[in-house]
Image (cartoon, rainbow, N blue to C red):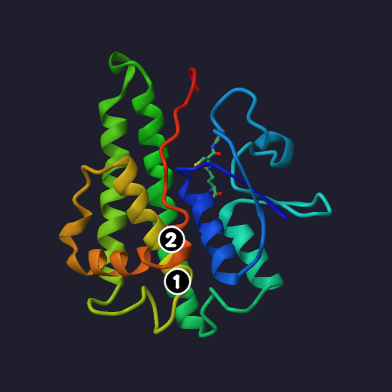
């Protein structure tokens, strides 16, 4: 199978980490989805990466849906906790982390505009969402726990570890490290080979979007 990806994308990274953790071989196709000529619309009507392209040509898009596909088709090792309470807790962390990334994508696009055309209230609105989501993630994760939920690596770790490193690359002014237990969790997660091999790298968007 192939994964259509972008180097800074936290959504694509979630999938890359899951593929790595599950030991599933794949070919990585990288593009800048915002640039003219991006191939994402050929595979995903929504025109977004990540897209998982199966050998049959069937495509799965939307990171949460791709992760569900991977878990259903390749249940071992699990990234979805088997305990319902822990599964819901992990999915809540994913909702918050994805939502913070969504808000940051809006900030990023707004910052692409000439300064005079930027909306300060819009930027503040999105930035407040990111800060609130990070604070809620910090509240939900027990200080001192080795993993985001329960006692094993899961979707919750993928979502939170990915969000925090994305913020470091794209939004370093956010002081998320004031949550010391999040910093400790992130440092542990980032040492896993699946995180080390997928560190986000900035891309340059060419032209107006
Ligand atoms: N909710 C989607 C978000 C994916 C997304 O926003 N991808 C961005 C790159 S990080 C993209 O491809 N944007 C191109 C566009 O919207 O045209 C997911 O989880 O997969």
Q: Is residue 193 above or below residue 100?
A: below
Query: Residue at image x 49%, y 17%?
Result: 207
Query: Residue at image x 44%, y 76%?
Result: 153
Percent position of residue 121, x then y: 27, 30
Q: Is mark 2 within 8 Å of ligand 1?
A: no
Give the class, few, some or many, for how many residues have Cα within 10 Å of label 1's Cα (few <14, many ≥20).
Answer: many
- State the residue in front, 27 or 45: 27
Percent position of residue 175, x then y: 18, 50
Q: Quadrant of residue 126?
A: top left
Percent position of residue 188, x then y: 32, 70
Q: In the current view of this chain or complex, which residue is farthest to the left? A: 178
Q: Nearer the viewer, mark 1 or mark 2?
A: 2
Q: Which residue is mark 2?
A: 195
Whether residue 92 appears in this view of the structure is no
Tag count: 2
Q: Which residue is mark 1?
A: 90
Q: Quadrant of residue 77?
A: bottom right
Query: Residue at image x 34%, y 16%?
Result: 114
- Specify the quarter for ligand 1: top right
Query: Residue at image x 53%, y 73%?
Result: 79
Q: Is residue 147 above or below residue 2?
A: below
């Amino acid at each position: 199978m192939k994964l259509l990806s972008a180097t800074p994308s936290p959504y694509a990274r979630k999938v890359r980490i899951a593929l790595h953790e599950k030991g599933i071989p794949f070919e990585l196709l990288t593009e800048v989805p915002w640039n003219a000529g991006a191939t994402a619309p050929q595979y995903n009507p929504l025109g977004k990466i990540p897209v998982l392209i199966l050998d049959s040509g069937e495509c799965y898009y939307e990171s949460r849906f791709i992760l569900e596909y991977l878990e259903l088709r390749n249940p071992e090792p699990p990234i979805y906790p088997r305990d319902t309470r822990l599964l819901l807790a992990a999915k809540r962390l994913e909702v918050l982390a994805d939502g913070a990334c969504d808000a940051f994508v809006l900030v990023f696009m707004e910052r692409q505009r000439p300064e005079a055309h930027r909306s300060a209230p819009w930027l503040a609105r999105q930035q407040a969402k990111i800060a609130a989501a990070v604070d809620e993630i910090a509240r939900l994760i027990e200080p001192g726990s080795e993993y985001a939920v329960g006692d094993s690596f899961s979707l919750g770790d993928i979502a939170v570890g990915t969000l925090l490193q994305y913020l470091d690359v794209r939004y370093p002014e956010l002081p998320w490290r004031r949550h010391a237990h999040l910093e400790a969790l992130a440092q542990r997660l980032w040492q896993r080979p699946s995180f080390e091999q997928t560190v986000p790298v900035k891309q340059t968007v060419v032209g107006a979007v």
